[in-house]
Image: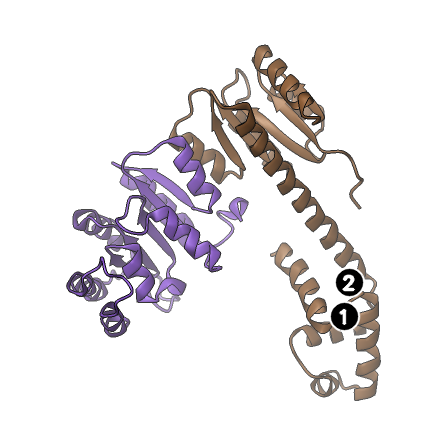
Chain colours: A brown, B purple
């Protein structure tokens, strides 16, 4: 289960003036903010599994913003990244977006534009976290099924009728009905459609 | 063969800016493409992967075709987003290479329309002159790549090959 922590805007920029002005801007709208002067400092802080988003300067001495992004991807971080840059070009922007950045903003930008993008990123992060939490919950329920119940579930999801499932598993139709009812109960499924959706959701994530 | 339905559809009146004659010309291009199939395709596949090229400039279409065909890719070209949509072949493409500045529906509008219809065919956008905000907007809409013209042929080939290798290559944008 993911703990409820207030989302934080993490800022990584080697320029102290930019860090200060972003800190003030974000504080002024009531967003918790933490600033870092290098990618390494951010990595060392282990913030990347916290809810929020990352506002990241692309050009920094030492580890560049794009390099930090690669490292975060290796850690399977889902923290949305908004790049800010003074001298971005199209290939750089495309590379960052292909690597999963949610946005790429050129300086100078209007404060409100950045805030809008940050709010979008925070929403996206909350959405991904909700989805991950839901998937974990479904996985827990799946694990609680007995092997027989799991077999019945797979056949139900494959769209087979009780009668066919009974034949396939060499069970009586009544027994299949009982297993099926247990599956619905353990999976907390409101309907067959809901059950199928849950199973597909987890399967798709594991592909 | 989609050619017949393509020609029939083009006589409809939904898209007045596209005279039917020009569509028929692009259909001829399609049948030419089908007859020149590279033998360099793995035998396991049912047919060569299909790549759609949508560009109003016939020279650009021809050069993309000659770039891609030797790679064992079958190229279907269209001169507008509208003629592509009318062809009904959207579901079978391995990827689409689309000029950003198409007359009528733009490349970005086509991308949005495909995505809102639940079609996630990989789209490589090509742009004559571009800027970072446009590229970012395209990537946010789910483009697989955004390449500036005069594009390096290698960049397109690399991206097409990556896309043909299967899903997952672009998973971060999902």
Q: Residue at x 23, y 61 (%)?
A: B16
From the viewer's perspective, is residue B50 above or below residue A117?
A: below
Secondary structure under badge 2? Answer: helix
Secondary structure under badge 1? Answer: helix
Q: Residue at x 52, y 18 (%)?
A: A60
Asked where in the image residue A95 lies, by quadrant, the reply is: top left
From the viewer's perspective, is residue A174 above or below residue B83?
A: below
Which residue bears the numbered disc 1? A150
Which residue bears the numbered disc 2? A142
CA neighbours of label 1 inside 10 A, class few (<14), some (14 to 19), many (20+): some
Q: Chain of mark 1?
A: A
From the viewer's perspective, is residue B141 above or below residue A31?
A: below
A149 vs A50, nearest the viewer: A50
Q: Is residue A179 left or right of residue B8?
A: right
Q: Quadrant of the N terminus of chain B?
A: bottom left
Q: Residue at x 24, y 63 (%)?
A: B37
Q: Chain of mark 2?
A: A
Q: Residue at x 42, y 25 (%)?
A: A88
Proximity of marks 2 and 1: CB atoms separated by less than 8 Å: yes
| Distance between mark 2 and mark 1 Cα atoms | 8 Å
- The answer to whether dots 2 and 1 both sit on one chain is yes
From the viewer's perspective, is residue B150 above or below residue A165?
A: above
CA neighbours of label 2 inside 10 A, class few (<14), some (14 to 19), many (20+): some
Percent coordinates x, y for residue B22 in the rendering: 17, 61
Q: Is residue B136 left or right of residue B151?
A: right
Percent coordinates x, y for residue B92 in the rendering: 38, 64
Percent coordinates x, y for residue B146 in the rendering: 37, 40
């Amino acid at each position: 289960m993911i703990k409820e922590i207030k989302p934080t805007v993490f800022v990584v920029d080697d320029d102290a003036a930019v860090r200060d002005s972003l800190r003030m801007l974000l504080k002024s709208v009531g967003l918790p903010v933490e600033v870092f002067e290098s990618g390494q400092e951010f990595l060392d802080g282990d913030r990347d599994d916290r809810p929020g988003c990352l506002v990241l300067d692309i050009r920094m001495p030492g580890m560049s913003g794009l390099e930090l992004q690669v490292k975060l991807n290796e850690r399977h971080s889902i923290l949305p990244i908004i790049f800010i840059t003074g001298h971005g070009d199209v290939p750089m922007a495309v590379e960052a977006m292909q690597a999963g950045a949610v946005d790429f903003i050129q300086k100078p930008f209007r404060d409100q534009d950045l805030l809008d993008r940050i709010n979008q990123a925070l929403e996206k992060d909350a959405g991904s976290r909700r989805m991950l939490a839901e998937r974990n919950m479904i996985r827990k329920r799946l694990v609680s099924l007995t092997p027989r119940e799991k077999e019945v579930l797979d056949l139900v999801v494959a769209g087979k009728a009780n009668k066919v499932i009974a034949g396939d598993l060499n069970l009586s139709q009544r027994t299949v009905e009982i297993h099926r009812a247990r599956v619905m109960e353990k999976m907390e499924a409101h309907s067959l459609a809901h059950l199928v959706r849950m199973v597909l959701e987890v399967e798709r994530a594991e592909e | 063969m989609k050619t017949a339905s393509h020609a029939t559809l083009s006589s409809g009146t939904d898209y007045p800016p596209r005279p039917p004659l020009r569509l028929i010309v692009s259909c001829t291009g399609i049948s030419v493409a089908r007859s020149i199939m590279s033998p360099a395709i793995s035998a396991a596949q049912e047919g060569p992967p299909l790549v759609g090229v949508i560009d109003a400039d016939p020279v650009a279409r021809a050069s993309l075709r000659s770039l891609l065909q030797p790679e064992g890719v079958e190229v279907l070209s269209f001169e507008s987003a509208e003629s592509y949509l009318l062809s009904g072949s959207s579901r079978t493409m391995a990827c689409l290479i689309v000029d950003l500045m198409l007359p009528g529906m733009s490349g970005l509008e086509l991308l949005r329309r495909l995505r809102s219809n639940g079609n996630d065919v990989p789209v490589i956008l090509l742009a004559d002159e571009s800027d970072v905000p446009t590229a970012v907007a395209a990537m946010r809409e789910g483009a697989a790549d955004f390449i500036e013209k005069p594009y390096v042929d290698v960049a397109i080939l690399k991206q097409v090959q990556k896309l043909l290798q299967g899903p997952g290559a672009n998973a971060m944008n999902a």
